[in-house]
Image (cartoon, grey):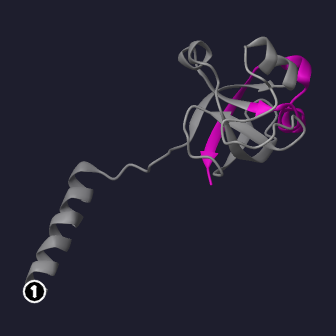
Amino acid sequence: MLKLKIRMMAVILFAVFFYGCKPAYSAQIQTASYYTYESCVREGTSGVWTASGERFNENDLTCALRSRDFGKSYKVTNLKNGKSIIVRHNDFGPNKKLHSSGRIIDLSKGAFQRIANLKEGVILVNVESI
């Protein structure tokens, strides 16, 4: 039994060394925007509830990503000014069209204005899983 465990560990170590081990979510540099109650209504959603089932508050430090791992935290850094913020994932977005054009994350209005001026609208960010 011990020999089998040792062999299994050797195979796993070889595979990690030979093929490399990629993290489940690596840092990504893409664009980010913000969303509000009004922008949700314009897109056809109620704007009141998030995909995770909680009430949407545009002043909370939350974000929307194209995954369903709600509750996870991310560090978002504005690459223009170096400001960072930690946000909690509670919604699904950006929409498919925006995501395919390079938008990786939508921040709540409250989170966005902590790292950028709202007039900018779209910023270049680095998103890291925490």
- The reply to whether the magenta stretch includes residue 61 is no
Does 83 appear above or below 1? above
Does 86 appear above or below 64? below
In the drawing, does residue 123 fall left or right of residue 114?
A: left
Residue at horizontal 90 percent and vertical 23 percent from the top: 118
- Corner quadrant of residue 77: top right
Which quarter of the image is occupied by the N terminus?
Answer: bottom left
For badge 1, the amino acid type reads Met
Residue extending farthest to the bottom is 2
Residue at horizontal 49 percent and vertical 45 percent from the top: 25
Where does the magenta region start and end? Answer: 107-130
Label 1 sits on residue = 1
Q: Callout 1: 10 Å neighbours few (<14), some, many (20+)?
A: few
* Residue 127, horizontal then vertical, whole percent: 64, 40
111 or 84, nearer to the observer? 111
- Corner quadrant of residue 116: top right
